[in-house]
Image: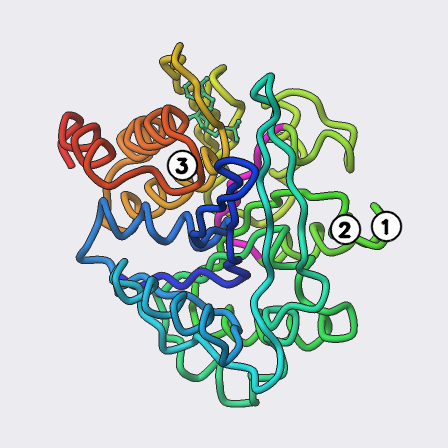
C-alpha cells in the first residue's frame, strides 16, 4: 500500500520583502516533507492530517494542498479557530528572525476531530509520519488520547515514522518533551532524528551516540541526519555511514531535514534501497538549501532530482 500521511501543522508564512511588503506562502515541517515526497514520487498517495479554520487563508491553504496533489481526507476545519502564522524578517546582515502566532491555532484542536472510528480508516502497510513539532502542537490534555490513537494504528499494521524535531519554545518544559519523545520512539517503526534534536534533551552530541540511544527501542530503521557531515543508518543489524557532498552555496537551511525526510520515505515506500534513498534525500535537501524559504521552486528542484534519476 503506497500511502503515507503527515500529521501536524501547516502555517501561514509571511516574509518581509521590504518595510511595506510581505510575501505570503504556507509552510510547516510535515507539509514541507509531504510536498517534496509528492514531487519526487507522485504515485505514492501522500496526505495531510491537520486542522485548519474556515477563514479565507484556510481555504487557500486547502487549495494549495490540492495543487500539490496532497490527499485532504484528514484535513479538518474548525468552526472558530484559524491557522497558525509566522513572520520571517531578514536583517541587513542576512540574519533571519522568526515571530510566531500559533498558540491558539486550529491545529492544536486536531484531536477534537478524531472520533473512535478514525483509526479504522488507516490500513495495514500505510505510513503515518509525526514529528516532535506535531507532538508539541497536540494540546497536553489530548496527548493520552493521541497515544491511544497511535497504538490503535500500530495494531492495525500502520508504520509509524518519527522525527523528533525539537523546538524548545513549543514545550512547557524539557522534561515534558523528553517523555513525549520516549513514548514516540517506543511506538515508532522508523526514526529520522537529527543529531541536534537530541543534543539538548538527552545530552547526545554525535551521530553514533544517536544510534546507540535509538537501538533499545524496537525500530526497524534508524536514519540519523547530521548536516553536511554524513548520514548514519541502522537497519537489519547493519550500520552504514553515507557520505554527503557538502553544498558550498548555502542560502537558507530551512526545511533541509523536511525535504530529506519526505524524499527518503518516498524512496523507501517505492522499495528503493536504504543507500539509494539516502542519496536521493541528500540531493533533495542539498537543493532546497540553495533556495530561500521552506519550499524551493519546482523547476530547479525537479531539474536537480532528474539529474539523479527521479
Ligand atoms: P540537518 O537537519 O542540518 O541535519 O540537515 C538535513 C539534511 O540536509 C542532511 O542530512 C543533509 O543531507 C542536508 N544538508 C544539510 N546541510 C547541508 C550542506 N551544507 N551541504 C549539503 N547537504 C546538507
Q: Return the mark for residue 173.
A: 1
Q: Nearer the viewer, residue 6 or 184?
A: 6
Residue at figure coordinates x 57%, y 40% from the top left: 88
Task: Name above or below for residue 10 compared with residue 108.
Answer: above
Task: Name above or below for residue 11 compared with residue 52.
Answer: above
- Asked if disc 1 is less than 8 Å from ligand 1, the answer is no
Predominant SS along the magenta part: loop
> Neighbour class for label 1 at 10 Å: few (<14), some, many (≥20)?
few
Q: Which residue is mark 2?
A: 177
> Neighbour class for label 3 at 10 Å: few (<14), some, many (≥20)?
many
Q: Mark 1 falls on what kind of element? A: loop
- Asked if disc 3 is less than 8 Å from ligand 1, the answer is yes
Find the distance from the CA under tag 1 to the CA under tag 2: 7 Å
Specify whether residue 241 is painted magenta: no
- In this picture the colour scheme is rainbow
Q: Nearer the viewer, residue 124 or 129?
A: 129
Residue at figure coordinates x 38%, y 42% from the top left: 295
Specify whether residue 194 is painted magenta: yes
Residue 209 lies, in percent from the top left, at 66, 25
Contact? badges 1 and 3 (CB < 8 Å): no
Find the distance from the CA under tag 1 to the CA under tag 3: 28 Å
Task: Name above or below for residue 186 compared with residue 1.
Answer: above
Q: Which residue is mark 3?
A: 260
Q: Which residue ends up furthest to the bottom in the rendered image? A: 116
Q: Which residue ends up furthest to the top in the rendered image? A: 248
Specify the quadrant that holds the C terminus: top left
Residue at figure coordinates x 59%, y 23% from the top left: 207
State left or right for residue 156 relative to residue 93.
left
| Magenta stretch in the rendered image | 188-195
State left or right for residue 233 relative to residue 135.
left
Contact? badges 1 and 2 (CB < 8 Å): yes
Amino acid at each position: 500500500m503506497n500511502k503515507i500521511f503527515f500529521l501536524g501543522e501547516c502555517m501561514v508564512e509571511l516574509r518581509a520583502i521590504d518595510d511595506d511588503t510581505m510575501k505570503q506562502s504556507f509552510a510547516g515541517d510535515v507539509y514541507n516533507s509531504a510536498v517534496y515526497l509528492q514531487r519526487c514520487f507522485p504515485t505514492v498517495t501522500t496526505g495531510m492530517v491537520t486542522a485548519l479554520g474556515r477563514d479565507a487563508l484556510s481555504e487557500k491553504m486547502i487549495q494549495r494542498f490540492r495543487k500539490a496533489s496532497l490527499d485532504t481526507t484528514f484535513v479538518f476545519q474548525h468552526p472558530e479557530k484559524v491557522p497558525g502564522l509566522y513572520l520571517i524578517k531578514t536583517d541587513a546582515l542576512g540574519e533571519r528572525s522568526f515571530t510566531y502566532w500559533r498558540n491558539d491555532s486550529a491545529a492544536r484542536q486536531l484531536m477534537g476531530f478524531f472520533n473512535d472510528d478514525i483509526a479504522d480508516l488507516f490500513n495495514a502497510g500505510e505510513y503515518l509520519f509525526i514529528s516532535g513539532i506535531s507532538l508539541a502542537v497536540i494540546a497536553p490534555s489530548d496527548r493520552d488520547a493521541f497515544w491511544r490513537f497511535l497504538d490503535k494504528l500500530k495494531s492495525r499494521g500502520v508504520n509509524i515514522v518519527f522525527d523528533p524535531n525539537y523546538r524548545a519554545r513549543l514545550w512547557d518544559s524539557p522534561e515534558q518533551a523528553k517523555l513525549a519523545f520516549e513514548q514516540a520512539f517506543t511506538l515508532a517503526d522508523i526514526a529520522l532524528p537529527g543529531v541536534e534534536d537530541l543534543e539538548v534533551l538527552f545530552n547526545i552530541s554525535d551521530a553514533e551516540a544517536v544510534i546507540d540511544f535509538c537501538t533499545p527501542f524496537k525500530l526497524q530503521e534508524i536514519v540519523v541526519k547530521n548536516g553536511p557531515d554524513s548520514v548514519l543508518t541502522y537497519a537489519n543489524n547493519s550500520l552504514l555511514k553515507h557520505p554527503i557532498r557538502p553544498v558550498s552555496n548555502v542560502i537558507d537551511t530551512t526545511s533541509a531535514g523536511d525535504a530529506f525526510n519526505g524524499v527518503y520515505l518516498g524512496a523507501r515506500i517505492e522499495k528503493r534501497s536504504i543507500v539509494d534513498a539516502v542519496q536521493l534525500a541528500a540531493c533533495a535537501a542539498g537543493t532546497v538549501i540553495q533556495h530561500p524559504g521552506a519550499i524551493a521552486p519546482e523547476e530547479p528542484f525537479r531539474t536537480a532530482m532528474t539529474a539523479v534519476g527521479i
